Every structure is written in C-alpha cells, then in structure tokens.
Amino acid sequence: MRETLKSATLFLGLVGFAAWPLWAQNRKAPDPLTDETVAVLKGYVRIDTANPPGRELRAAEYLRGLLEREDIPSEIFVSSPGRANLLARLKAEKPTQPPLLLIHHMDVVPADPAEWSIDPFAAKERDGYLWGRGALDSKITGALHLMTLFQLKREDVRLNRDVLLLAVADEEAGGRWGSQWMVENHWDRMKPGFVIDEGGFGLIDVFSYDPVPVYACAVDEKKVLWLKLTANGRSGHGSVPNTDNPIDVLRKALARMEQTFIRFGGRTPEPVRDLERAVPHPRKSPLLEAVRHNSLSVTSFQSWSGAAATPTVNVIPDRAVATLDCRLLPGEDEQDLLAKLRRAVDDDRVRIEVTVQTRVTSDYRDYRSPLYDGLVRAVRRHDEKAVVAPFLMPGATDSRFFRAKGVRCYGLVPLVLTEEEYLLMHASDERLPLDRLEKARRIMYDWVKNFCLETDDGVDGKRR
C-alpha cells in the first residue's frame, strides 16, 4: 500500500467540519473512512438538486473538486443549461477486462420544507440519522462509490480493468439529460462491461418475518407505461344530470381497463421466485407484491368546463383527464396490452395516449455472473447471517439505458434498512441510519475491489 493522500481529519476540515460527530465519538473503534464518507455525504446533500429544475452542475463541480484532490481525472459534460453529468476514471495500468461503471444520479425529488421536521437540505445529524433529501436516494450511492475509488487509489490496488464513476442528471424525471444523453452522446468514453447502480438495499422485515437482512440486488426492472386518458362530454348545470358527463364516462372506462389489466400478464418473474426461495419465512409485503404482477395506479384525475381552470361545484364539465402509471413485468408486450385496453374501453368519447414508455432489454433469466457471485462473498464476509437474493425493481432506474446496450447491470446499495426507513425515499424526513454505514462502505469496497483486482482469471481475487 502507498501512503494515504490525505488524513481523514484534514479532509473533514476541508469540507468544514471542526469535530467528529457524536455518533462517531461513541463508536468502539472509529473508522476514518466512514467518517470521511459522512462528511462527503453532508456536503453533497447540502447542494439543492431538486428536479425540477435539477441544477446538477453545482453538484458535479463539488464531486470534481473531491476527485481532483485524489488525483483522479474526471470530466463534466453539460447536457443542457445548468444540467450536467460527471465521468471519472480510475485507470488500470494494463487493463485486460472491460470497465466497471459505478453510476448514481445527482438529482433528487422536490422537498417541501413545510412538510419536514428540519430543513431538507441542511444535512443534519439527529437521533442517530443523517437527515436530508437525497440521503438515501441516491447521494449515499454516490458517496459510497466515491469512497471506493478513493480507497482503491490510496491503496494502490492493481486493477484488471478501469473503474468508472458516472454521476448523472435528471434520473428522477426520466433521464433525458442524464444517462440517456450520456449513452447517446458519449458511449465511446464508457463502454462498460458491467454496471453497479442504485436499486435494492439490505432490507429487514420487508421480505421475511425473520430479523435477517435480505440484500436484494436488482437484476432487472419493470417496464414503464404511462398513459393519459381524456374523456369528452357535454357540459351543463349540475342540477340537471346528463348521460354524457365526462367524469362518469372516464370512471367507467377506468373500471373496464382495470379489469382487463388484472387478466393480462404471465408468470411471476424468475428473480422474484428465486428471492422467495432464498428468503426464510417469506412474508407478503407491498414491495414484493408490486414485483410479482403487472400493476396499474391512477395517479391523477382532473376535469374542466370551458376555459375554467378549476372545477365548479354546480357545473358539469365538458372534459375529464386521468393519468395512469402502469408497470409491466419484463417480457410483457406493451402493444398487445394497449390493444386490449382500447378494446375494453370501446368508447369514442375516450382517447388513450402513451406519454412515457420504456423498453428494457431483459437479462433476468441469466443474472448470475462473477460480479453477482462477488457480491455474495462480500456480503457474507461482513454479515454472515444475511441473505443475498436477486430482485426485480418495481420502478425505473438508469440501468435501463445500459441494458439496452447489452450491458449486465446490478442495483444495490449495501445499507441495511427497515421497511419504515426504506419508505422514506421520496417522502418527508428522508434520513440515513449512521450506525449501519460502516458495514455498507466495507461491503461496497470489497465487492468492487475483488471483482477488479488483477488476477490470473479476473475472478477469484488472488494477486498474480
């Protein structure tokens, strides 16, 4: 090993922390790298990247500054005014394998301070947690990836492949200015063989009644199909009902669509069955149920009458609009579903439009690989009683753009969370449990290091 470029104390001073936090002082054996991870994460969370509008350029500059101090080269790619992506590369001296890409998104969902117990961008510690928007989704992912690069560089690890860090914009709004833009415009600068992304966590009391963490590694994700339904009708006075009330028309159309949707679809996906087989005493949870079936949620319902911006209680509107969030299992045929939905509605007064549609190249039937096996070894080294299992993401991630290029992608932040903590993502008072961060950092580092360590076969973690 070569000497660490900077001490953790100097680093903390650099980002503005004069003393160790209380939780670090109370640990039996303080871990400087974990303390440094917390400092990095605090600085990151304090940069407001709520999307819209995003403003990820400031966050990209923050990350570039940290990388420069470690002599790790990086580039910032501006995809739109104020929107940016950062790509860093830790080079192998003599690479024999394609790069491993560590990806996370810099943007976060909006946070209304009135709904929070504290300022959502203050990054404060309280009750053993770090509070702040993005603390879980997904700036902790970036902090763990960053610290992994730093440790690989500081320990002068002999790599069999380049390790890339990609921080992207716009994930929360579809990825147009982030991963999609990078894949379309700068693929030649990346060309990864494998990707580690956000996705699952080490979840307690979500999949099993036993109090053991289940490290659910996302190996695929459901497809997104967002629909907009518009019903036109005949307006009039609310005291005189008519048969062309567009709200009634739309309500009946939605009921027929929901019945059709329930009957549509095939078998439970393989990674879900594998997870259920791997977990002791499995329980039915909302998260598990969401990935066993196709799903449909009505997410908004509005009506208008003429030029009025808001509905009036005594006026039957002439138009009603609903939005639907449909999530389809891998392998399902979106066009077949749409044809069945239109036949079920069978009403000229209702128009069905597709507003967002993603097509994912599925590899879930063959998720085992040296990288997945390396994750199992890394978790068991630090958490002997834990279960590692494949997971199907109910939502969309940036991995879909890389899967479409034929790249094997895995999504996991190896941080243990309860169901209550997991559900804080996108909610008020999002927060990260600090007492479980050290284990997460060590698992992430071992996972990446052992996969990228220069060996005879690139897999078993032994030096040449």
Image (cartoon, rainbow, N blue to C red):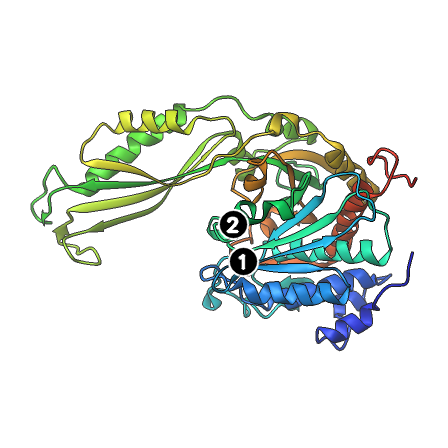
Name the spot of residue 43 as percent of width and height, x first: 65, 68
Mark 2: few/some/many CA within 10 Å (<14, 14-19, 20+): many
> Quick one: SS at disc 1?
loop
Q: Visible in this render: residue 126? A: no
Residue nearer the viewer, 288 or 77: 77
316 vs 394, left or right, is left
- Per the image, the residue denoted by label 1 is 107
Which quadrant of the view contains residue 278? top right
49 vs 52, left or right, is right
Q: How many marks?
A: 2
Mark 1: few/some/many CA within 10 Å (<14, 14-19, 20+): many
Name the spot of residue 297 as percent of width and height, x first: 40, 40
Do the residues bearing badges 1 and 2 touch, measured as CB atoms within 8 Å? Answer: no
- Above or below residue 293? Residue 419 is below
Residue type highlighted by circle 1: Asp
- Above or below residue 158? Residue 346 is above
Name the spot of residue 443 as percent of width and height, x first: 77, 47
- Whichever of labels 1 and 2 marks the residue nearer the N terminus, that label is 1
> Residue lying furthest bottom in this view?
18
Residue depicted at x 58% and y 42%: 399
Residue nearer the viewer, 151 or 201: 151
**Where is the N terminus found, in terms of image quarters?**
bottom right
- Per the image, the residue denoted by label 2 is 181
Residue depicted at x 74% and y 51%: 440
102 vs 264, left or right, is right
Which quadrant of the view contains residue 252? top left
